[in-house]
Amino acid sequence: MNVTQTLDTKGLSCPMPIVKTKKAMDTLVSGDVLEVLTTDKGAVNDLSAWSKSSGHELLEHKEEEGVFKFYIQKG
Amino acid sequence: MIKALSAKEVAKRVVEGKMFILDVRNESDYKDWKIEGKGIESINRPYFDLIDGVEDVLEHLPKEDVLVVCAKEGSSVMVAEMLDEAGIKDVNYLEGGMKAWSEYLMPVKIGDLKDGGSIYQFNRIGKGCLSYLVESNGEAAIIDSARTIEAYEDFTKQHNIEVKHMIDTHLHADHISGGRRLAEKTNASYWLPPKDAEEVTFSYEALEEGKDITIGNTKIEIQPLYSPGHTIGSTSMIVDGQYLLSGDILFVDSIGRPDLAGKAEDWVSDLRDSLYNKYNNLSKDLVVLPAHFGKISELDEKGAVQAPLGELFEKNEGLNIKSEDEFRKAVTENLPPQPNAYQEIRETNMGKIDPSTDEQRDMEIGPNRCAITE
């Protein structure tokens, strides 16, 4: 997977991880992959739901030592 | 200017008033569990669909008095500010979000006891959990305590009451009991039915029939009545000859489910016997005080959940299933989903695991789901 850009939102709490994800996504073009790092547990469900509702594809997400990593491809 | 509304203020309006709620959590969380009430109207728009603006949602909102709700608070503040800028008057947000809503306990006085003293219901309105405080002459017993024991501590301090007994009617699967922790803090005894306590890692007093518990010098009697079915140890309590604390065996609108410890088939006949024989032989004038409610419509005008046993034998469908076979089906098939993290919650209540406060809070999220119907 080619990550186009990485966005670090570690330490930020809701709604900031998604607000920043959205802003970053707006600068990318269709097909680009954004990697999002967050420590906010609540963001897990919300990022999945947001990707769906905004037409992007959540390719993968995983947890590594308390950090959630999301790979979202712009639709 | 937007304003924070505390869970306490929201609870007051759920019981007595009207309110319009914009819930900005994601759709699945909203569908699973939300603030409800007779005068409550709510719609769901996830906050992440409102980041660019609230124009689309304005036409679905009243011009004034809107409560914005999210999981923890942050997103509701963001959306509330946007609504305020868009011209809606009196925009509030729920302080602490659904997390705080889930934990708030509302004390409601149920009645006086014959020789002095009184009984209070602590309604955890956000989760549908009911606990009880019986007090007489400066002493109290607390039954089916919630995890957040601060509400009882504040209450007993205010009323100058000493906690003598912490009692759990059964090993809970939907919430973490505060019984053991408050007993330790106040030097009270912690009572559990021994059949539910076979695997616990701590010492406790055995809650058994015949072992009456008294508080105060007016001798308020708390008589345990073995009534298995929801769990194998489930024990009801008759307080002062007037109140039947039915635990998770009998609710106002439903009956307890027998499957949360994985033994549904084994416990069906126990459950039927407890309800159709043991309860049927009790005075129908007893006021049933259950450990849960399922729907907010079960609350009366002062926010209490209660009903005479006789009335429940007439109206509660769970008490009116003629054939044993039908009963078996009703309590084992098509049950609602289990409570969130119910296995971990049981293990925590047995003392086998010791999650952090944050983890415990997450484990308890959502409705109680201890009845056979939702």
Image (spheres, rainbow, N blue to C red):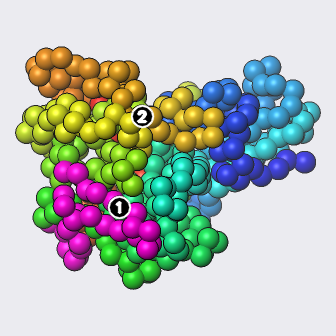
Q: Residue B166: where, in percent of width, then height?
A: 37, 68
User: What label does residue B257 carry, if any?
Assistant: none
Nearer-the-camera pick, B183 or B308 = B308
Residue holding disc 2: B308
Q: Which residues are magenta?
A: B199-226
Q: Are marks 1 and 2 on the same chain?
A: yes
Residue sitting at x 55%, y 42%: B304
> B326 above or below B201?
above
Name the amino acid, label 2: Pro
**Residue B222 sits inside the magenta stretch:** yes
Q: Residue B124: where, in percent of width, then height?
A: 52, 50
Query: Secondary structure beneath disc 1?
Result: strand
Residue sitting at x 79%, y 44%: B92
* Res B290 seen here: no
**Few, some or many residues within 10 Å of mark 2 (<14, 14–19, 20+):** some
**Few, some or many residues within 10 Å of mark 1 (<14, 14–19, 20+):** some
Q: Residue B82: where, in percent of width, then height?
A: 82, 40
* Res B301 seen here: yes
Of mark 1 and mark 2, the one earlier in the sequence is: 1
**Residue B137 sits inside the magenta stretch:** no
